[in-house]
């Protein structure tokens, strides 16, 4: 083969997908635990990218992922984070990696929404969002009507069991105050 010839490196599995892009807020979107989750990666693409909008004071329950690292780039806002015995604050521009198998939670601090670009190597968390989320084409659900016990049960069945309550405002303040 001469230096001007090339080899076709596509396989039938990879050639079926086409290049794609999504713009901000574009993609399948769900109201999830009261916040907005938007699937930004095209169907079938890895890693799975989820644009997650968390309102001020928002905090997921303490949970663990059995099959994926929970990693994200923080586009806007500020967070207090607990991962195992480690605590830290994260600010816009920070990349956060929470290893699989380590219980973690976080809380949005301040009065600004936090926007995260979450990355996952598998679909377990996305399947959870799709199972319990409400399509964003509908009105956001009333938080008082959400069945958190049923949602948490689905969390466990999809690989991210809930282990405890969300981070309190007091714990988040202690994390932020200790680090400033």
Image (cartoon, rainbow, N blue to C red):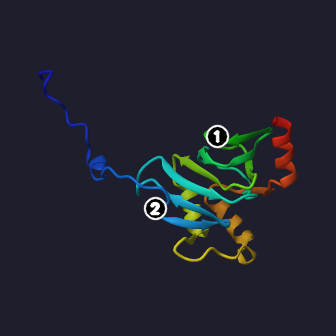
**Residue 177 location (% of width, % of height):** 85, 41
Image quadrant holding the N terminus, namely top left
Q: Is residue 155 left or right of residue 43?
A: right
Mark 1–mark 2 contact, CB under 8 Å?
no
Q: Residue furthest top?
A: 3
Mark 1 Cα-neighbour bin, 10 Å: few <14, some 14–19, many ≥20:
some
Q: Secondary structure at mark 1?
A: strand
**Residue 4 location (% of width, % of height):** 13, 25
Image quadrant holding the C terminus, namely top right
Q: Which sits earlier in the primary sequence, circle 1 or circle 2?
A: 2
Q: Which residue is mark 2?
A: 27
Rendered position, 93 above or below 126 = above
Rendered position, 137 above or below 119 = below
**How many discs appear?**
2
Identified at 78% across, 57% down, the residue is 166
Q: Is residue 176 left or right of residue 147?
A: right
**Residue 173 location (% of width, % of height):** 84, 47
Measure the C-alpha gap from mark 1 to mark 2: 23 Å
Residue placed most toward the observer, 127 or 108:
108
Identified at 71% across, 74% down, the residue is 146
Identified at 73% across, 59% down, the residue is 58
Q: Which residue is mark 1?
A: 96
Q: Secondary structure at mark 2?
A: loop
Identified at 67% across, 56% down, the residue is 113
Mark 2 Cα-neighbour bin, 10 Å: few <14, some 14–19, many ≥20:
some
């Amino acid at each position: 083969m001469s230096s001007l010839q090339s080899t076709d490196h596509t396989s039938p599995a990879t050639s079926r997908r086409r290049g794609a892009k999504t713009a901000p807020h574009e993609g399948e979107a769900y109201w999830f635990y009261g916040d907005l989750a938007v699937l930004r990666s095209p169907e079938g693409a890895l890693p799975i990218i989820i644009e997650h909008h968390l309102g001020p004071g928002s905090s997921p329950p303490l949970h663990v992922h059995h099959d994926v690292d929970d990693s994200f780039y923080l586009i806007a806002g500020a967070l207090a984070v607990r991962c195992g015995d480690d605590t830290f604050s994260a600010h816009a521009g920070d990349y956060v990696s929470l290893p699989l198998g380590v219980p973690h939670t976080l809380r949005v601090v301040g009065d600004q929404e936090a926007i995260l670009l979450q990355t996952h190597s598998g679909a377990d968390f996305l399947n959870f969002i799709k199972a319990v989320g409400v399509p964003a084409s509908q009105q956001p659900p009333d938080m008082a009507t959400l069945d958190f016990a049923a949602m948490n049960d689905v969390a466990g069945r999809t690989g991210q069991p809930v282990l405890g309550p969300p981070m309190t405002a007091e714990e988040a303040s202690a994390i932020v105050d200790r680090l400033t």
